[in-house]
Amino acid sequence: MKTAIVYTVLSLVNFAAFAIGVGTLPAQVPIHFDASLTADVIGSPWVYVALPGAAALISAGIWASLAQKKNRAVTVGLLSALGIIFATIGWAFFALIASGVKIGERTDFPLALVMVLPLSLLVVWLGNCMPRIEPNRVIGIRTAATLKSEEVWRKTHRLGGYLFFAAGILSAALALVFGVVPTLREIQYVAVAPLVLSILSAAIVCIVYAHVLGKRQPPPVEDEQNG
């Protein structure tokens, strides 16, 4: 409960501070950037409140997770980390807009380092936690096969732990390369693809693996009827 209280207070303070900051920005600012990170659409700066707002809303999920008997620590940890990432990305965009970037101007926003790297590290953390997730209907790889058999759940999440950990490490390494190497920073948006593809691949492999394990499970033994 202490974590939930601290996160809720800090996320609300962060939201309020962000809203105050947005109030100091011009009425029209760049709100969209193309693949080359060139500002191409202008609009109200209040759209950027969505990120700290999402971070504050995550506190509701944290409080709800306290009612769980299983996986409480894992759920609270992952939600808190995700909220911190949202808040950080929000302030990064605020700094970009506050710097005075204009429509048609190409920015040097460190997309790979500010967005892809933290999300990749979150995937690493998820992979590390997956083998410890107990069967439930809230988090984890929830398929008909995993929910039906604790053995299938355990084996699937053990494999998922390896796959998501590897996916996160790979994505984080590529994010660092694209974010640091000068010649690659111009196309750093490419670093988003490995993150998305590796997560999808890991999830698909886990789902297929669970299905195969489920097919191999012996059918339930029916109780003999008396008489």
Image (cartoon, rainbow, N blue to C red):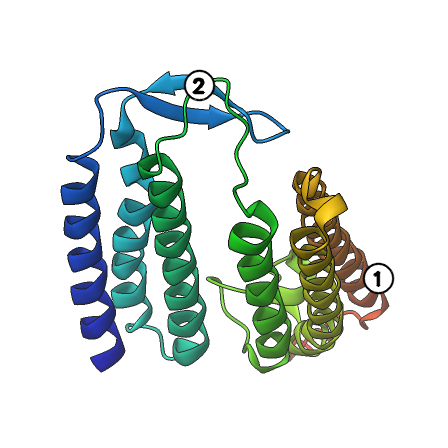
Residue at image point 56% right, 46% down: 111
Circle 1 crowding by C-alpha within 10 Å: few under 14, some 14–19, many from 20: few
Which label number is shown at residue 103? Answer: 2
At which x and y percent is residue 64?
Answer: 28, 64
The residue identified by callout 1 is 212
- SS at circle 2: loop
Can the viewer see residue 1? no
Can the viewer see residue 110? yes
| Amino acid type assigned to the residue bearing label 2 in the image | Ile
Residue 7 horizontal side relative to residue 71, left or right: left
Residue at image point 22% right, 25% down: 26
Q: Is residue 145 above or below residue 191?
A: below
Which label number is shown at residue 16? Answer: none
Which label's residue is closer to the chain start, 1 or 2? Answer: 2
Q: Nearer the viewer, mark 1 or mark 2?
A: 2
Image quadrant occupied by the N terminus: bottom left
Residue at image point 46% right, 62% down: 138
Residue at image point 16% right, 35% down: 24
Residue 109 horizontal side relative to residue 83, left or right: right
